[in-house]
Image (cartoon, rainbow, N blue to C red):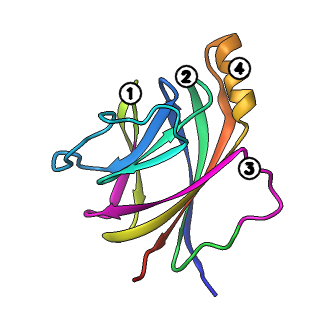
């Protein structure tokens, strides 16, 4: 049975429908965020980063990050508007949240260096889109659960 190692809650500043998890030090990345951002794709991976497409243009999304010691359990009991899985390799084990409007945040997601499987789930997309259109911003309407676990061969 897999064990939850760590859970943290953070805010992600969404700009232009996007935010990213990226290596804290992006100097060595071949394609740093937001280059090659795949507009309209809920979850996409590039070397050293994971991009998220949000339903709202400009807002603050509520993000819960879980780090597991093995495959995260399948999610039940919640209706998710979007879900996706990608692989992510962290060289440093330190991942920051990045925004097109604000750049790198100070908050870090701490992993071990290595290859990870990542599942992202999101709810509240219609509300975030509505509030973004009506008021220009929103806070916490769109909620993400992002689960990391080591990828074993």
Farthest right residue in view: 77
Q: Earlier in the sequence, mark 4 or mark 1?
A: 1
Which residue is rendered at x = 23% and y = 49% of the image? Answer: 25
Residue 60 falls in image quadrant: top right
Which residue is rendered at x = 73% and y = 37% of the image? Answer: 124
> Relative to 9, is 31 on the left or the right?
left
- Nearer the observer, disc 2 or disc 3? 3
Q: Which of marks 4 and 3 is nearer the N terminus?
A: 3
Residue ID for mark 2: 58
**Marks 4/2: CA–CA distance:** 9 Å
Whether the residues at callouts 4 and 2 have beta carbons within 8 Å, the answer is no
Using the image, determine if residue 2 lies above or below residue 59: below
> Relative to 76, is 88 on the left or the right?
left
- Nearer the observer, disc 4 or disc 3? 3
Residue 1 falls in image quadrant: bottom right
Q: Residues within 10 Å of mark 4 (few under 14, many from 20)?
A: some
Residue ID for mark 1: 102
Using the image, determine if residue 64 lies above or below residue 1: above
Whether the residues at callouts 3 and 1 have beta carbons within 8 Å, the answer is no
Q: Which mark is residue 80?
A: 3
């Amino acid at each position: 049975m897999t064990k939850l190692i760590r859970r943290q809650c953070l805010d992600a500043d969404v700009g232009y429908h996007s935010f990213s998890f990226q290596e804290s030090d992006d100097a060595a990345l071949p394609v740093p965020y937001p280059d090659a951002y795949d507009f309209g794709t809920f979850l996409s991976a590039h070397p050293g980063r994971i991009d998220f497409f949000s339903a709202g243009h400009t807002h603050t999304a509520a993000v819960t990050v879980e780090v597991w010691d093995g495959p995260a359990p399948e999610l039940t009991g919640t209706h998710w508007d979007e879900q996706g899985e990608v692989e992510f390799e962290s060289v440093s084990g330190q991942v920051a949240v990045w925004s097109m409007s604000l750049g790198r945040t100070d908050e870090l997601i701490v992993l071990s260096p290595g290859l990870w499987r990542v599942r992202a789930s999101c709810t509240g997309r219609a509300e975030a889109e509505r509030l973004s259109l009506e008021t220009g911003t929103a806070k916490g309407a769109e909620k993400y659960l992002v689960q990391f676990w080591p990828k074993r061969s």
